[in-house]
Image (cartoon, rainbow, N blue to C red):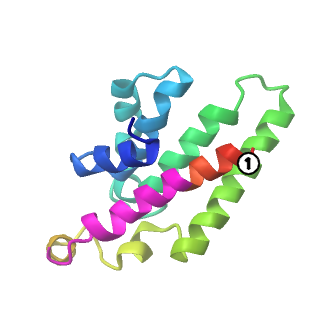
Amino acid sequence: MISKIEKAIDTFSRGYNCAQAVFSTYAPSFGIDEAKALKISQGFGSGMGRLQEVCGAVTGAFMVIGAQNGSADLDNTPAKEDTYAQIKAFNTRFRERHGTILCRDLLGIDLNTEEGQQELWEKNLLSTVCARCVRDAAEIIEELDTQG
């Protein structure tokens, strides 16, 4: 059986963005079908719509943490606090591995320029930097799940 970490990497390698790869891997565990998860998370790739803000693998993981720990009940303060604590823990671990959670800093290029797009392919950044971010996001989710 393929691990969720490997499934996330496989989803990314098939052409889905980093947020889609992470969120769609875990979403079925929370009653969200894979196709719906791919739609929900599509706009979060490349640092949210190619804005190169928070890495899509990170936002995908944040959505997983919310689905796992969050509550729709406004009075469920413990669930909210637990979700925020898990987000902070994820953030700390991801930063320890990469130094940042910002797409622009992880890649070191501007995806909104022709030069940046060319560098993305020339330097094989999708297969190196982005794939590693997807893998690390899934690994950290697994670590948090086993400790929580």
Q: Is residue 82 above or below residue 72?
A: below
Give the residue at x 44% y 42%. 3
Q: What is the quadrant of the N terminus in the image?
A: top left
Coordinates of residue 68 in the picture (x, y in percent): 64, 33
Report the span colored magenta: 122-139
Residue 34 lies in the magenta stretch: no
- Write the residue at 35% across / 32% down: 39
Main SS of the magenta segment?
helix
Q: Dot 1: few (<14), some (14–19), or many (≥20) neighbours within 10 Å?
A: few
Tag 1: residue type? Gln
Residue 128: image quadrant is bottom left
**In what quadrant of the picture does the C terminus appear?**
top right
Name the residue carrying label 1: 147
In the rendered structure, the answer to whether residue 86 lies left or right of residue 48 reads right
- Residue sitting at x 73%, y 48%: 147
Q: Secondary structure at mark 1?
A: helix
> Residue drawn 19% across and 77% down?
119
Coordinates of residue 105 in the picture (x, y in percent): 43, 76
- Could you tell me residue 131's position as x and y percent? 34, 61
Q: Nearer the viewer, residue 144 or 109?
A: 144
Please give left or right for residue 71 compared with residue 140 in the image.
Answer: right
- In depth, the one of 52 and 88 nearer the eye is 88
- Count the marks: how many? 1
Query: 62 left or right of 108?
Result: right
